[in-house]
Image (cartoon, grey):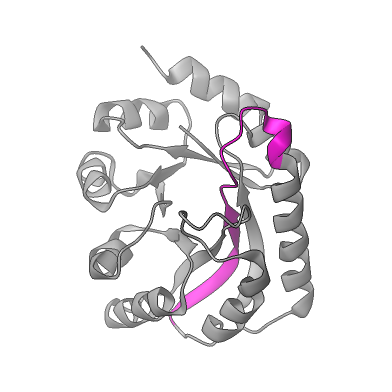
Amino acid sequence: MSITPNVKQLLAELPKGVILVVAAKTRSPDEIMEAVGAGVRVIGENYLQEAERAYEAVGDRVQWHFIGHLQKNKVRRAVSLFDMIETVDTAALAREIDRRCAVIGKVMPVLIEVNSGREPQKSGVYPEAVELLVLEISALPNIRVEGLMTMGPEVGDPEDARPYFIETRKLFDYLKELNLPGVTMKYLSMGMTNSYRVAIEEGANIVRIG
């Protein structure tokens, strides 16, 4: 099935200033190329090996965001490929990204992944610990904290996701007002295929849609 009509409809529907990240999980490089041809400018990858295969086909005509759980032993390869890492949730991971970026002379934009549902089985930092993490990593010279990302719990009704998006946006606004050096708080990445409309209503300016 062609994904072009869906992509074009989505791009037309999104408000100005909202960035569409197409989650490429399980999509073939040909399908990704089709999405790019339809106007997609940012690809989101959950797995490094899949991203490397897709990058060979697509290259740097788009931006690449890492949106999965990044293991420290894959950071060296990840920082050379990705334009943003949306899933930083520990100081140790941030330091490894910083260290590997220093070697290649790159400053990596990152988002802090917030576990807004406080679900122990999921990655991400709990909302009450986000400020401390941001303070701890904001001085690292080769990363730049540019915002927050949350997935929220899986819900059947998108409305059930709204409280988690509201809490994450309030945290985003609070951190923005702190004006911390090395922290810009430009991006709020929330909402997926079934919840992106609610996320946009609550302030998301990046949505991740498969």
In the image shown, does 189 or 113 lie closer to the viewer?
113
Q: Magenta part of the protein: which range?
A: 142-161
Q: Residue 206 location, x and y as percent?
A: 60, 47
Relative height, residue 135 to residue 128 (above, below): below
Q: Residue 193 location, x and y as percent?
A: 55, 31
Magenta span has 130? no
Residue 61 in view of the camera: yes
The quadrant the N terminus occupies is top left
Relative height, residue 76 to residue 191 (above, below): below
**Would residue 114 be found to the left or right of residue 60 on screen?**
right
Report which quarter residue 43 is drawn in. Answer: top left
**Would residue 57 be found to the left or right of residue 15 on screen?**
left
Q: Residue 166 location, x and y as percent?
A: 76, 51
Q: How many numbered dots are placed on residues in this image?
A: 0
Residue 203 in view of the camera: no
- The residue drawn where x is 56% and y is 82% is 138
**Would residue 72 be found to the left or right of residue 165 on screen?**
left
- The residue drawn where x is 77% and y is 39% is 201
